[in-house]
Image: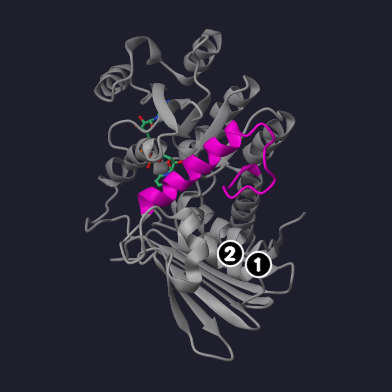
Amino acid sequence: MKRRLKLGIIGGGPGSWIGHVHRIAARFDDKYEIIAGVFSRNLKINQKFAQKIGIKKDRCYKDFKELCLKEKRRKDSIDVISIMTPPGSHQEIAELFIKNNFHVISDKPFAGNFIQAKKLHKTIKKNKKIVYGLTHNYSAYPMVRYAKKLIKDGKIGNIEYINVEYIQDWSNGRDITLKNAKSIFKWKLEKKFAGISTVLNEIGSHAFHLAYYLTGLEGRKLFADIKQYSKKIKFDTNAQVLVDYENKGKGLFWISTTARGEVYGLKIRVFGNKGSIEWIQNNPNHLIYGNSKGATKKLERGFNESSYSKKFSRIKYGHPEGYLSAFANLYKEISQEINNKNPSRKKFFPNEDDGLITAKYIDACVKSSKRKKWVNLND
Ligand SMILES: NC(=O)c1ccc[n+]([C@@H]2O[C@H](COP(=O)([O-])OP(=O)(O)OC[C@H]3O[C@@H](n4cnc5c(N)ncnc54)[C@H](O)[C@@H]3O)[C@@H](O)[C@H]2O)c1
């Protein structure tokens, strides 16, 4: 058995649910051991949390710079760093570790804005020794992987329409006021931390990525209408986006954090000239496959003709498998890539190229909404 990779973590401290998800995903297949970290910008909280999850005192650092510098000097240093801080810091942290030859796993969005994204992309491309993985976790569900294969194999024909909704309700039953907004949304209200657009960086990035991951199509131009929460509470909360694709296909995206009563409503539909697919993250073990000349089928993960999806599953069909194991697929695939002396060109997990493309969409959306005009994606 290959040795476990030594993992360091930046962010994901108390109160961050995605921190917990990363730690579980890293351990899921026994490919990593978490040995170092900075879990909060508050030193006391950081140290207390590190102790709670079993990090040795001398491997809990005061900030990411100290972690990088001191780990680099150790013989038993970390191999990989995992970043789960707010978006505005992703580029700075990732670049430091890449320049020091550590592999990087980062949560989305790739960077806070397109300028940062371009810089980070360049830095990653320059260092051929490192592997960079971006945790767009929805791309790792078994039935999403199967949908990608169906599309690639021409089962739905030439793609004509893509429709993605990622709509949520961040109020969670509360009335949001000027008084309580800061305590509820925290850094998501500030561009310095949240980046160019909160709704687009937080969930729009997933929506654009999933469409790209499944179809491989890139947009040529887009039109976006972005809404702020209110005149007084200023942050982007809703976006409607039209995309013209390179193959003349059309995309329609709705991304919202103020869709009352909706919980993690991520749904993608892709229509080709021979058929269609539909996947809904709240029901991830099923894929609807529509055939223009026959019956529409509900395909089950790992069962009968969906057996391809078994590769990305751990339990038998009919038993619910979900979010954590899909997230763990990314950790597993990244570990395989790191351990592979001749990195494969058949990567499943999202990387810096996926990151740059989603950052480009988000940048164009913000420009389009401001100008109230279509914006070319390749200017
Ligand atoms: N992949 C997903 O489905 C998913 C889901 C939720 C969040 N996220 C992403 O995860 C990131 C974090 O979001 P969150 O909701 O967990 O935020 P959060 O505010 O709940 O948690 C962030 C944590 O990072 C710590 N932190 C912040 N800056 C730090 C620094 N410089 N050094 C060390 N620790 C630092 C904070 O103390 C906190 O514990 C964001 O990029 C977000 O988009 C991804």
The secondary structure type at the circle numbered 1 is helix
Q: Which residues are magenta?
A: 323-352
In this rendering, would 71 be left or right of 160?
A: left
Magenta highlight: main SS: helix
Tell which of 233 and 376 is nearer to you: 376
Position of residue 308 measured from the top left corner of the image (x, y, whole percent): 52, 63
Based on the picture, tell me whether residue 273 belongs to the magenta stretch: no
In this rendering, would 12 be left or right of 310?
A: left
Position of residue 84 measured from the top left corner of the image (x, y, whole percent): 44, 35
**Callout 1: CB less than 8 Å from ligand 1:** no
Position above or below: 147 against 117? below
Instruction: Give, as a three-letter code, the residue at label 2.
Output: Lys
- Image quarter for ligand 1 equals top left
Q: Quadrant of residue 129?
A: top right
Residue drawn at point x = 38 percent, y = 35 percent: 27
Tell me the residue that label 1 is attached to: 152
Kindly indicate whether the residue at mark 2 contacts the one at mark 1 (C-beta within 8 angstroms). Answer: yes
Position of residue 40 measured from the top left corner of the image (x, y, whole percent): 36, 25
Tell which of 220 and 309 is nearer to you: 309
Residue drawn at point x = 62 percent, y = 70 percent: 151
Based on the picture, tell me whether residue 328 belongs to the magenta stretch: yes
Residue 303 appearing in the image: yes
Disc sitting over residue 35 in the figure: none
Position above or below: 206 against 223? above
Position above or below: 109 against 147? above
Disc sitting over residue 148 in the figure: 2
